[in-house]
Image (spheres, rainbow, N blue to C red):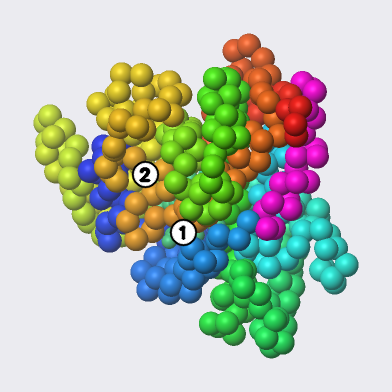
Amino acid sequence: MHAVSTCDPENMQAVMAGKDWGVGFRLDGMGELLGRGIITTDGEEWFRARKMLRPGFNRNNVDDFAHLDNVIQGLLRKIPGDGETVDMGPLFYDTFLDTSLKFILGIDARDQNDGRPVSTETFNQLWLDGLVGMGLRLLLGSMRFLAPKAHYAKACATVHSFVDFAIDKAEERLLANAVGKTKSAADILLSQTSDRKYAQAQLLQGILGNQDTTSVLCSNVVQLLAEHPEIWARLRKEVKESDRELLTYDGLRENRLIQNILLESLRLRPVFPVVARRALRPTVLPTGGGPNGDQPLPVPAGTTGMVNFYSLNLDTAVFGADARSFNPDRWLNVKPSGKEFMPFGTGPRSCLGKDKALAEAGYLLVRLVERFERVEGRSGKGAGWRPEVRISMKNKAGYKVAFWRAEEA
Ligand code: HEM
């Protein structure tokens, strides 16, 4: 099988946004856990799923931060404020798993007495085990029959039963006319279909999209700021002195420093460094062919196209000579085109959760700078950034930092 790896903006755009490329191949490795849904299908089937899920991501459904704030207050209580080392990776992971259960399934992670088939903790563990099994199958490709089966099958069955329980609850809410203003993806789907298997697949894929994305962004942001105390101090000053309400959807979006910190983190540490597509038919990439690599490149059907955001984001011609350094202020001067910077993908399949992720990461960041005077990196010498790619890219060295609580907090 052929494969093309590219960090050329034109080629990346063609692979990510072009009709000749698809993701249906993911079904082989992901199907048992996640079924046929928005992330594993192409064409009409994908289009229908995206259209059905879309209303959940509209602004009026992602601008209520009440549940997030509640979860963040719990998180803040767990962070030592006296300089003791803490690994923020697992804490952020739990935070966004909690909000994911609410946003996607409509379930409160802490409300354990509602008849759910297993506890939230068991669900979390088996979901993780399921992802490990799924990752192994993706890695093994056509040899995936070699992967151990028994525990994976158990993990898939339990995760499915948990989602089915959420579907029961959403059906009950719909029947009782008790769906709230902010709707979960379960509420939104069940109001459009009675096909439970179909809804189950979309919800599982919604959890996948939601999980390990905003949490990884927040982990990277805190670690980068721990290495740049002057920016933490600046943001703290700005938050304290802000004469407008920051903790609203618009307040967060319009704050340049917050947005620039998030963009700069996504640039240097993209949550998804590489994304793959497969050519659905013979096609042509804009460049990379001919003796000098500057001609169009014909590509046979079945070719894997790997687009590399990690390299794209380090282009000195676009981001400046210091492209490898963390400098949120660069965004005051650079204006990359949609092809030159696309941390949320591009084209019809771009990320549905982009606005939600940026709003929630910004919200969490404000809460952290309000509470903590300063933060310091604790990964140890030489262990600063050791990228490891599973589904998303994380720091293998962990996200160890130390916080000092502000006197007034
Ligand atoms: C920092 C956070 C996030 C980043 C960097 C990110 C990035 C991406 C990227 C690059 C894609 C395109 C993948 C591809 O083309 O194969 C994508 C798709 C998607 N994302 Fe996100 N994402 C984030 C957060 C979220 C959140 C919070 C949700 C849900 C609540 C979400 C839901 C989705 C969905 C459903 C898709 C599939 C869209 C489709 O195929 O039509 N994402 N995301």
Q: Which residues are magenta?
A: 66-85
Residue 272 forms part of the magenta stretch: no
Q: Name the quadrant containing residue 172.
A: bottom right
Q: Amino acid at mark 2?
A: Met
Q: Position of residue 404 (x, y in %)?
A: 74, 24
**Along the line of sight, which residue is nearer the eye, 152 or 74?**
74
User: Which residue has dot 1 on it?
Assistant: 352
Q: Which mark is residue 342?
A: 2
Residue furthest front in the image: 243
Q: Is mark 1 within 8 Å of ligand 1?
A: yes
Q: Is mark 2 within 8 Å of ligand 1?
A: yes
- Badge 2 marks a residue whose secondary structure is loop
Q: Position of residue 345 (x, y in %)?
A: 39, 49
3D distance between C-alphas at marks 2 and 1: 13 Å
Q: Position of residue 235 (x, y in %)?
A: 55, 31
Q: Name the quadrant containing residue 291.
A: top left
